[in-house]
Image: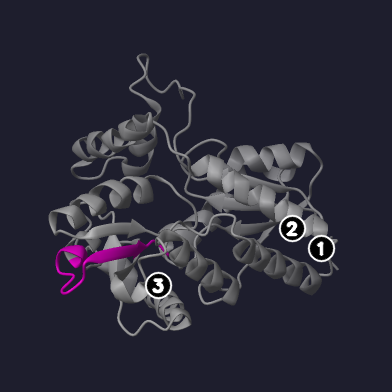
């Protein structure tokens, strides 16, 4: 029998925080280096890097993603402790510190030997699930015996009642008392990905399943789905329709409620692409704009993660 799980690592994309990475002699800003690390040498890269990095200037040049995801880690650790399955919960990111490798090295240095990985993405595609798993595998190979073993929580949760209930409650929270759901056009959103990538994964199907279940829970007969944050650069065509276009064609509505179910905590794709760009599109169309909070540390969502983690622990003999 394998050793029991002695820790959790929550793995996400990452977001720039204060602290120069020393990549350049004269620091261009944390956001610039963060975006550069993602975009790399793609066609149109330099222009795209400058464009996206400028979005962060609306928020002081940094992202709240690390703060919010670490709050989720803390909430999960507390929920596990209260359920009698207490283990430390860490975070590690692909594109910013603490990188996955840094986190695994810290865990190994503390004597932790077997970690359960929780991927911070509700819908599966190559750039989330496969890439995050690959980041862990690469880090473990570099660290050698100093790194803990890592398995992953494989259970899909995009249709789990805990995720749906948290989403529905956030939707209700977003509207003032005088504005009922029957009076607004509801638009569920997720990050766009290249069509070629979507064909090779269940990403779009899972996103639409989440939207359908949340709408069903609320008794909504009509709603729309839209994709967001797609760059106007290769590779190829990206999933649509764009949420801005969906807002612009919201026939008969006086208000719209945008629900970012593809994101589980606030970061730039929510704060800029929705709260600024999508809001501007709504105002230009003469629509009142509301945006549902992400699930974050909602008790139903954290409770779901705790249940799934404990089920995996029981299955593995922990």
Q: Which residues are magenta?
A: 246-261
User: Does the magenta-highlighted stretch encompass residue 255?
Assistant: yes
Q: Residues within 10 Å of mark 1 (few under 14, many from 20)?
A: few
The 10 Å Cα crowd at callout 3, few under 14, some 14 to 19, many 20 or more, is many
Position of 122 compared to 8: left or right? left
* Disc 2 versus disc 3: nearer the observer: 2
User: Is residue 166 depicted above or below 116 in this figure?
Assistant: below
Q: Quadrant of residue 151?
A: bottom right
Answer whether labels 1 and 2 touch (C-beta < 8 Å): yes
| Separation (CA) of disc 2 from disc 3 | 27 Å
**Spatial separation of the CA atoms under disc 1 and disc 3:** 30 Å
Depth check: give the residue in front, 148 or 281.
281
Compare residues 98 and 141 and report the one nearer the observer: 98
Q: Is residue 157 magenta?
A: no
Badge 2: few (under 14), some or many (20 or more) residues near its Cα, within 10 Å? many
Query: Which residue occupies 37% across, 81% down?
Result: 220
Give the answer, above or below, for where 187 lies relative to 110: below
For residue 79, which numbered disc appears in the image?
A: 2
User: Residue at position x 44%, y 75% from top?
Assistant: 210
Residue located beneath label 1 in the image = 83
- Considering every residue shown, the one lying at the far front of the view is 178
Q: Position of residue 315 (x, y in %)?
A: 78, 74
- Residue 25: name its quadrant: top left
Distance Cα–Cα, label 1 vs label 2 = 6 Å
Of the 4 image quadrants, the one containing the N terminus is bottom right
For this orientation, the residue located farthest to the top is: 25
């Amino acid at each position: 029998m394998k050793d029991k799980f002695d820790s959790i690592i929550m793995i996400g994309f990452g977001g720039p925080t204060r602290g120069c990475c020393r990549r350049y002699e004269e620091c261009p800003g944390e956001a610039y280096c963060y975006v550069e690390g993602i975009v790399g040498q793609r066609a149109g890269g330099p222009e795209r890097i400058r464009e996206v990095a400028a979005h962060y200037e609306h928020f002081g040049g940094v992202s709240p993603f690390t703060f919010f995801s670490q709050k989720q880690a803390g909430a999960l650790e507390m929920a596990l402790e209260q359920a009698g399955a207490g283990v430390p919960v860490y975070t590690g990111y692909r594109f910013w510190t603490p990188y996955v490798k840094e986190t695994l090295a810290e865990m190994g240095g503390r004597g932790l030997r077997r970690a359960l990985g929780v991927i911070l993405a509700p819908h599966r595609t190559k750039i989330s699930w496969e890439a995050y798993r690959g980041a862990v595998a690469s880090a473990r190979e570099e660290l050698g015996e100093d790194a803990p073993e890592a398995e992953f929580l494989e259970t899909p949760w995009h249709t789990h009642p805990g995720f749906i209930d948290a989403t529905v409650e956030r939707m209700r929270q977003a509207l003032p008392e005088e504005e009922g759901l029957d009076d607004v056009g509801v638009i569920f959103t997720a990050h766009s990905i290249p069509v070629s990538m979507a064909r090779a994964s269940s990403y779009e199907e899972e996103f639409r399943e989440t939207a359908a279940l949340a709408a069903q829970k609320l008794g909504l007969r009509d709603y729309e789905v839209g994709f967001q944050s797609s760059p106007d650069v290769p590779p190829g065509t990206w999933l649509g329709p764009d949420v801005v276009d969906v807002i612009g064609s919201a026939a008969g509505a006086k208000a719209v409620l945008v629900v970012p179910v593809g994101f589980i905590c606030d970061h730039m794709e929510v704060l800029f692409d929705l709260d600024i760009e999508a809001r501007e599109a709504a105002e230009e169309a003469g629509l009142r704009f509301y945006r549902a909070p992400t699930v974050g540390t909602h008790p139903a969502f954290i409770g779901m993660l705790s249940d799934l983690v404990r089920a995996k622990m029981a299955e593995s003999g922990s």
